[in-house]
Amino acid sequence: MSDALALTEALIRLPSVSPADAGCQSILIERLERAGFAIERLPFGPVENFWATHGSASEPTFCFAGHTDVVPPGPAEHWVTDPYVPVVRDGHLYGRGAADMKSGLAAMVTATESFVARHPRHRGRIAYLITSDEEGPSVDGTRRVAEVLRARRERIDWCLVGEPSSERAFGDTVKIGRRGSLSGRLTVHGVQGHVAYPHRAENPVHALAPALQELCAHRWDEGDGHFEPSSFQVSNVNAGTGAPNVIPGELKLRFNVRFAPVQTVEGLQRTITGILDRHRVRYSLDWFVSGLPFFTPPGALSEAVCEAVAAVAGRTPALSTGGGTSDGRFIAPLGAQVVELGVRNETIHQVNECVAVAEIDLLERSYAGILERLLA
């Protein structure tokens, strides 16, 4: 059994459902300390975080970033194995977090250990920024650590996030950016009444319908050369008392806009409220920005990543900005180039989450190759 596989299994055994860390970070910290890293634990609220460094801060800093928390396993009876008992079957390692992203953490650490052993006086600095709040609200995790680093004027030149970026084959996709995420909690105000006397009531469902149709049909933009067009999606709608003869008094709706850098939060908000106002909807609206878009133009970091992947997997990754958000959105504003490279993501957040054992080895070798290209 490879060291990276053994470490992945050790992490899977710990039920670190967000924001719990369940001891995962202690395992990683112990390994990094033995490799000569200086460790700084940075807990905030219920969230465990740490910042670790090795080498000189006077030269480029390469940062591995990731999370130890996982999503809940779902119905245990739907799993072929216990989600917290790692099992290898037919060349795949099963367990919650196998792909997202405990295999990534393990590959980071074992690749770093071997690199530091070969190059104890490597150029620059290797850093780790690890949290247990990526799968949760993302308030007390990387966001807070980034604030600490910014206040201290800590430098991160290159950041590699170990999220599972690969699609159909290992290394076919590397993320070099993500769209922003703007959410809204809309309450449409009406007047409750009897369905037989609609003139005495005001139905918020009817009031919102034309505006909602326009919002759903609106073409926000065409994206750009690196980003897909912005999109508007409704995630939750609730209205009514449950009785068939009562006009509801209010409607609650949740929506999200994933937006390209051609948009601004303020511009999106003006467009949405403008449509609601034009249709004379009576409403209140709370906004939530979970992340701004970020983009790393092709450069030294993405070149090193693509070369390392090609050397071990025989393919050159496509550079993508698709998918959801990641903690890279908190690190990019520090001035860092940010990319994401990990195993295939086809089973993440599903029951029977798994990763091909061979991909853990490929990921470790890729991470080691990146370090060699940038810091040897």
Image (tube, grey):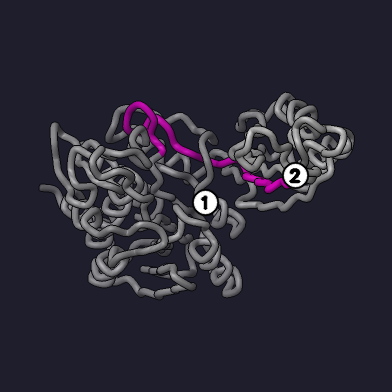
Magenta residues (range): 165-188
Q: How many marks?
A: 2
Above or below 178: residue 160: below
Residue 28: quadrant of the picture: bottom left
Which residue is pictured at 46% across the width and 29% down the height? Answer: 318
Q: Where residue 249 is drawn, which disc sits there?
A: 2
Which residue is pictured at 61% across the width and 51% down the height? Answer: 291
Specify whether 356 is left or right of 153: left
Q: Position of residue 61 (x, y in %)?
A: 46, 61
Above or below 131: residue 260: above
Residue 247: quadrant of the picture: top right
Q: Position of residue 24 (x, y in %)?
A: 29, 63
Secondary structure of the residue carrying numbered label 2: loop
Which residue is pictured at 68% across the width and 40% down the height? Answer: 261
Q: Nearer the viewer, mark 2 or mark 1?
A: 2
Which of these two is toward me, 29 or 120?
29
Specify whether 320 is left or right of 256: left
**In the rendered view of the protein, which quadrant contains the C terminus?**
bottom left
Which of these two is toward me, 350 or 110?
350
Q: Amino acid at mark 2?
A: Gly
Q: CA distance from mark 2 to mark 1?
A: 42 Å
* Residue 364 visible, this angle: no
* Residue 103 visible, this angle: yes
According to the picture, the residue beneath numbered tag 1 turns out to be 328
Specify whether 341 is left or right of 91: right
